[in-house]
């Protein structure tokens, strides 16, 4: 969990982890990001393979102009998976994991754009899960959702964290407090402190963290 005021660098850090900053005008990059012994920032790193290991869901759901089913199968086909039975099983399993299957199982061949905003966000999550990544990056995935859809996404994440490493940028301090196992407070591009979630919200070590949690800055 990474939380803090807007503009502090949380999204930039997420995008660094799977090299999405390669697609921007970032001019200077230093340091190392390690994933199971792999230096993510090494120029020799296979970025396509990395992004299969590290998936990302953005604040605004971006569904492909295809059917619900094809939104999931498209990535599988690009990854070289063409077994129809296995693909069908993956579609169902990923939609179930994203808490969406019960709502769409009978309309998989309808356009994905026909789904509500909350459903589209969960479809984006299912699309990432279908590729079986090791790490899932979530950049304010519930910022535009209503409370019911937000709860469904949070419930899904609680179930998924036993199988995946999840790095979440929440859309509020309240969500951070509800969902964090471990949390890092980021301010003006610096990591101010990192602690178990309960500890950082109940007993922050740095006064700047306390000020943000209590709403005195931000």
Image (cartoon, rainbow, N blue to C red):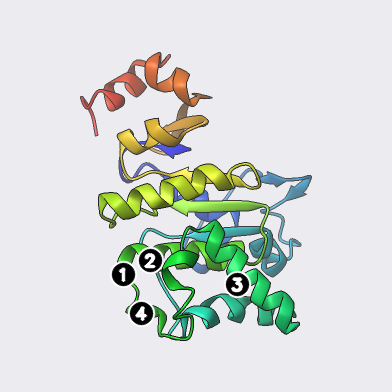
Of tags 3 and 4, the one toward the viewer is 3
CB-based contact (under 8 Å), mark 2 and mark 3: no
Residue name at image x 71 percent, y 83 percent: 84
Relative to 141, does residue 5 appear above or below in the rendering? above
Q: Which residue is mark 1?
A: 116
Q: Which of disc 3 and disc 2 is earlier in sequence?
A: 3
Q: Which residue is mark 3?
A: 91
CB-based contact (under 8 Å), mark 3 and mark 4: no
Q: How many marks?
A: 4
Q: State which quarter of the image contains the C terminus.
A: top left
Q: Most extreme residue toward the right, as rendered? A: 37
Residue 52 rendering spot, x and y as whole percentages: 67, 64
Q: Which of disc 1 and disc 3 is earlier in sequence?
A: 3
Relative to 54, does residue 155 appear above or below in the rendering? above
Relative to 58, does residue 171 appear above or below in the rendering? above
CB-based contact (under 8 Å), mark 4 and mark 2: no
Residue name at image x 53 percent, y 80 percent: 69
Relative to 78, does residue 158 appear above or below in the rendering? above
Q: Which residue is mark 2?
A: 119
**Secondary structure state at the residue bearing disc 4:** helix
Task: Give the left or right position of residue 209, taking residue 53 as reference.
Answer: left
Q: Whole-Å distance between the Cαs marked 2 and 1? A: 5 Å
Q: Which mark is residue 144?
A: none
Q: Which of disc 4 and disc 3 is earlier in sequence?
A: 3
**Secondary structure state at the residue bearing disc 2:** helix
CB-based contact (under 8 Å), mark 2 and mark 1: yes
Residue 24 rendering spot, x and y as whole percentages: 47, 65
Q: Which mark is residue 113?
A: 4
Q: Whole-Å distance between the Cαs marked 4 and 2? A: 10 Å
Q: Whole-Å distance between the Cαs marked 2 and 3? A: 15 Å
Q: Is 82 or 109 nearer to us in this picture?
A: 109
Residue 180 rendering spot, x and y as whole percentages: 47, 33
């Amino acid at each position: 969990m990474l939380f803090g005021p807007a503009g502090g660098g949380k999204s930039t850090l997420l995008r660094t982890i799977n090299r999405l900053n390669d697609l921007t005008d970032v001019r200077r990059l230093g340091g190392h990001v390690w994933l199971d012994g792999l230096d993510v920032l090494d120029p020799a790193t296979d970025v396509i393979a990395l992004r299969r290991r590290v998936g990302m869901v953005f604040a605004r759901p971006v569904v492909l102009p295809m059917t619900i089913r094809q939104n999931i199968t498209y990535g599988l086909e690009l990854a070289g998976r063409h077994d129809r039975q296995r693909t069908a099983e993956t579609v169902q399993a990923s939609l179930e994991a994203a808490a969406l299957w019960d709502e769409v199982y009978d309309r998989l061949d309808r356009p994905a754009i026909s789904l509500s905003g909350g459903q589209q966000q969960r479809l984006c999550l299912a699309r990432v899960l279908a590729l079986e990544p090791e790490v899932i990056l979530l950049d304010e995935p519930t910022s535009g959702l209503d409370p019911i859809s937000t709860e469904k996404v949070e419930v899904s994440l609680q179930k998924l964290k036993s199988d995946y490493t999840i790095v979440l940028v929440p859309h509020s301090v309240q969500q951070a407090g509800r969902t964090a196992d471990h949390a890092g407070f980021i301010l003006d591009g610096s990591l101010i402190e990192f602690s178990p979630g309960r500890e950082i919200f109940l007993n922050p070590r740095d006064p700047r963290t306390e000020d943000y949690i209590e709403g005195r800055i931000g």
